[in-house]
Image (spheres, helix red, strand yellow):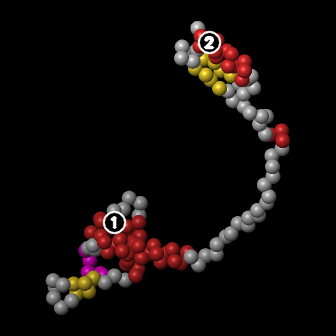
Amino acid sequence: MSDAGRQHADSEEHCRRTWSADQKRQIIAESFAPGASVAEVARRYGLNANLLFTWRRREQAASCASDMGDPVNIVPVRVVAEIAPPASATAPGPTGRMEIVLVGGERIIVGPDVDATALARIIKALTRR
């Protein structure tokens, strides 16, 4: 590691590094490179990975704040009354069918237009068997 970005205090044991804005941007850019590990980039520069994450968050926040100045494109919307579908598109009356399974396993399948009286007679006759 080079001494660039270091500022020595009174004793050699305690030193505080200072990084220029350009150096920080370079390190942050390296950490965002495809396949890059933040921990490895931080280690390479003698940084704590948490500090590098803080720099990254601040850089992203600053980037988002600068993007906020761009004008927003709004798409015009017009609300119109709902148009009823033509009569021919609607379903003709009740549809479907009913399946009746008797105790003996017999099945009776009827449509919606079945005569209830005739159906009752059929069921009565089948249950007597």
21 displayed left or right of 68: left
Question: Which corner quadrant of the image does residue 125 belong to?
Answer: top right
Asked if residue 14 lies left or right of residue 75, the reply is left
> In the figure, 114 relative to 62: above or below?
above
Instruction: Determine which quarter of the picture holds residue 98.
Output: top right
- Mark 2 is on which residue type? Leu
| Residue 36 visible somewhere in the drawing | yes
Q: Which residues are magenta?
A: 1-5
Q: Picture quarter containing residue 11?
A: bottom left
Judged left or right of residue 112, residue 26 is left
- Residue 91 in the figure: left or right of residue 37: right
Residue 91 in the image: x percent, y percent? 77, 36
Disc 2 element: helix
Frontmost of labels 2 and 1 is: 2
Main SS category, magenta section: loop
Dot 2 surroundings within 10 Å: few (below 14), some, or many (20 or more)?
A: few
Which residue, given by chain and number where applicable, does mark 1 sit on? Answer: 38
Q: Quadrant of the C terminus?
A: top right
Q: Is residue 109 magenta?
A: no
